[in-house]
């Protein structure tokens, strides 16, 4: 089953949105298979955002993501990578549809509440960066046959 890496960023943690965000993905019908509250180190931040290292906002991005605790998660489900991106909304909250997480809770691109993997390759890479295989729990949910 497909898995994705999602992370409530430091602004989302500070704004008490962990529960709201977990609730949205649970209610949708996706399954949480791993989660932790953690501080992102400089080294991990630079690896995680490696694709943006030549962008003008890279320094700001790394200092933001290391500025406070984040809530890192792995979610599982059919088409969860693309679906989670839809639920997050556009990168710039100004363009994010109302009803999406960024559309409902964020104003600025530099504080957009949540990260989500954008492809199967990035999901695999990001899950491996943040979690050991043994941190991920595989379990049956009887309700899944209704989802
Ligand atoms: P996403 O987080 O939607 O995958 P991205 O991978 O293009 O977006 O960029 C990673 C993060 O970098 C994004 O969540 C917020 C920040 N960012 C992107 N574009 C930015 C910009 N023009 N100015 C400041 N921060 C930006
Ligand atoms: Mg991205």
Image: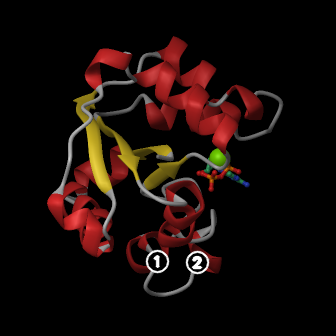
**In-image side of 136 versus 77 (left or right):** left
Q: Nearer the viewer, residue 37 or 2?
A: 2
Q: Which residue is mark 1?
A: 100
| Residue for point 49% across, 66% down | 88
The residue at which mark 2 appears reads as 96
Side of 51 where 82 appears, left or right: left
Residue closest to the eye, 141 or 96: 141
Residue 95 pos. (x, y %) = 65, 78
Q: CA distance from mark 1 to mark 2?
A: 7 Å
Picture coordinates of residue 50, whole percent (x, y):
70, 25
Q: Tell me the quarter of the picture where residue 57 sits.
A: top right
- Looking at this view, name the residue that lies furthest to the bottom: 98
Relative to the observer, which residue lies in front, 132 or 40?
Answer: 132
Residue at 51% across, 17% down: 44
Residue that appears at 57% across and 38% down: 123
- Check disc 2: other Cα within 10 Å, few if <14, some if 14-19, many if 20+: many
Find residue 27 and report its image quarter.
bottom left
Q: Nearer the viewer, residue 54 or 141?
A: 141
Looking at the rendered structure, the secondary structure element under dot 1 is loop
């Amino acid at each position: 089953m497909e898995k994705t890496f999602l992370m409530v960023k430091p602004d989302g943690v500070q704004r008490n949105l962990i529960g709201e965000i977990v609730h949205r993905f649970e209610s949708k019908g996706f399954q949480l298979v791993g989660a932790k509250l953690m501080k992102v180190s400089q080294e991990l931040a630079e690896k995680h955002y490696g694709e943006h290292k030549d962008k003008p906002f890279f320094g700001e991005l790394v200092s933001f993501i290391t500025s406070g605790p984040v809530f890192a998660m792995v979610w599982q489900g059919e088409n969860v990578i693309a679906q989670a991106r839809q639920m997050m909304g556009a990168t710039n909250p100004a363009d994010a549809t109302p009803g999406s997480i960024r559309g409902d809770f964020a104003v600025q691109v530099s504080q957009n509440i949540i990260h989500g993997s954008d492809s199967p390759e990035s999901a695999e890479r990001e899950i491996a960066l943040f979690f050991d295989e043994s941190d991920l729990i595989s379990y049956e949910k009887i309700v899944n046959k209704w989802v």
